[in-house]
Image (cartoon, rainbow, N blue to C red):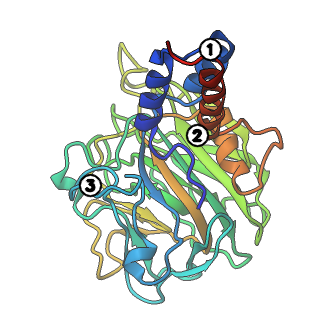
Amino acid sequence: MVRLFLNNTKQVRACRSLLRSRHFRFAWASLALATCASTSMGAQIIAFYGFDDGSSSTNLLLDSAAGGSAPSTGERGAQNGAFAGTGTAPVQVTGLVGAGALSLPGNVATNQYVKLEGAPTTNTPPVLGSNNFTVATFFKRSSTAGVGASTGTGGIASLEPMVAKGNAQAEGSNVDANYILGISTITAGSPKLAADFEDFNNGLNHPITGNTTITNDVWHHAAVTFDGTTFSIYLDGLLETSINPINANSGANPLATSIPRGDSVQFAALGAMLTSTAVASSQTGRNGAFNGSLDEVRIYSGALSLGEIQTLAAAGGIGPAAAPEPASLSLLAIGAGLLITRRRHPAR
């Protein structure tokens, strides 16, 4: 399985250790500094779903963001998914990256989806909530459409949700949507990548829709980011569009309250939008359905750069050919160089 940017804390420590090394030589300085700067230090991975272990539904939906460790219940990296709703369950299919992907049978609203947070109201803030974020995934939309639903008043009138933490529920409180990424089906026969969130001021929606018509039954890479000022969506490693979501009704400091509801207690899900009162044993609190496959779903607590998003897309052979080298590979190259330098100049 390819895992890029899975544990930025470890990368930061490696960079610091490298820069303090007494065997460090100027020849490697610029490369090391470039590597340490190549990852958005504030964007920590908080959930990762690779769908590679199909031995059971539990293993299929494991959250691997902790990099192999075993975090406590309620911590980031412990948000294992679970099938919810009624009807046909998602299944493992051949993946684009790694051994598997998740196929969501969203051709009718009665099919099951994946619920990611067990009880977000017990976490402050909710584990998968973040004011600044990146949500990224590979996706392959079926030629048989899913079920489009509204993201809320002033939002996207018809969206098939892929990864979402929120649903149209209320306005101006912590039951507003934190992030929604999916496919807009407003224009018949022209599905577009789209995203939305509701803000801290009065729950105003900030929809954003791409320009490229999605090709069905073909793998693509999608990402949406919010960096504190700019809301952007990316398709196949390229920027589709971005907006500066100023809320005209937010008073003297419009930018401060025009940010996503990172404190939302609405449940996060794959293939559905959920309210805070969603019931796992039924369709209560659920809107929308995505019909197709997802692979390598990642949620970060900050905005990745364009280069980092292109690296994620390139892991599946998608996007610009000249993708930046992953930080982990750069560190290996630096380590090899240090070893050579040390052998040429042994410690005295």
Figure quadrant of residue 283: bottom left
- Identity of the residue drawn at 37% across and 21% down: 256
The Cα–Cα distance between marks 3 and 2, rounded to whole angstroms, is 23 Å
The amino acid sitting under disc 2 is: Ser
Look at the image and tell me whether residue 84 can be seen.
no
Left or right: residue 59 compared with residue 206? left
Percent position of residue 9, x then y: 40, 35
Q: Which residue is mark 2?
A: 328
The amino acid sitting under disc 1 is: Ala
Mark sitting on residue 299: none
Q: Which residue is mark 1?
A: 29
| Residue 213 vertical placement versus 104 (above, below) | above
The Cα–Cα distance between marks 2 and 1, rounded to whole angstroms, is 16 Å
| Badge 3 density bin: few <14, some 14–19, many ≥20, Cα 10 Å | some
Percent position of residue 34, x then y: 63, 21
| Badge 1 density bin: few <14, some 14–19, many ≥20, Cα 10 Å | some
- Identity of the residue drawn at 66% across and 59% down: 186
- Disc 3, disc 2: CB below 8 Å? no
